[in-house]
Image (tube, grey):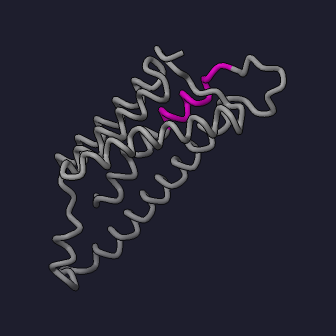
Amino acid sequence: MNKNTISGMVILMFALIYTIMAFRLPASSSNTAVIGPSVFPAAIGILLIITSIMLIGKGWLEQRQQHGKTEPENPMEEEEEKQDPKKVFVLSLLLLGYVLLFFPLGYLLSTALFILSVTMFLDREHWIRNVIYSLAFPGIIYLVFDRVLAVYLPLGPLG
């Protein structure tokens, strides 16, 4: 199996868990809500499932094409494409932690911690930018969902 197949399978596993959890969100307590709180998370989960299946398919196609070749066309390109298994494992653990902490900590805290941990793991040199991203992104998304779309995300201990 190549990196696309493995990545697609890992993402598919998380996407399935995420989508199941999205569909289990409680119904809106407001009678005026046009759409329920699970619509957008479920849509994101379904899109993630679709793209992970496409990634698995791409990996299988690449594997079939490479099966007939004995030597890569560009050896330097082959080396650049190798994934660091440690990095993939750590990122998978961070994603699992995000999924598990989403409801207990709420959207804002869990998303901020997830973005901060991923960005710090991948690029420690730009820690100020990482902190700004991890605070700004969840805040903006929360305001859009809460104020514009009237879809209430779990707040956890902040609620």
Q: Is residue 71 above or below residue 46?
A: below
| Quadrant in which the N terminus is drawn | bottom left
Answer with left or right where residue 39 lies relative to residue 153.
right
Residue extent of the magenta highlight: 16-26
Q: Position of residue 103 (x, y in %)?
A: 48, 21
Residue at (34, 76) in percent of width and height: 65
Q: Position of residue 32 (x, y in %)?
A: 84, 25
Q: Position of residue 130 (x, y in %)?
A: 31, 46
Q: Position of residue 26 (x, y in %)?
A: 65, 19
| Quadrant in which the C terminus is drawn | top right
Q: Is residue 101 above or below residue 63?
A: above
Answer with left or right where residue 67 lies relative to residue 53.
left
Question: Which of the 4 quarters of the picture holds residue 70?
Answer: bottom left
Answer with left or right where residue 91 lies relative to residue 138.
left
Of residue 6 and residue 124, the one placed in the foreground of this image is 124
Residue at (16, 78) in percent of width and height: 76
Magenta-span inclusion, residue 93:
no
Q: Is residue 126 above or below residue 108?
A: below
Q: Is residue 87 above or below residue 157?
A: below
Of residue 105 and residue 48, the one placed in the foreground of this image is 105
Residue at (50, 34) in percent of width and height: 18
Residue at (35, 56) in percent of width and height: 5
Residue, far bottom: 73
Question: Which of the 4 quarters of the picture holds residue 100?
Answer: top left
Magenta-span inclusion, residue 19:
yes
Of residue 133 and residue 30, the one placed in the foreground of this image is 133
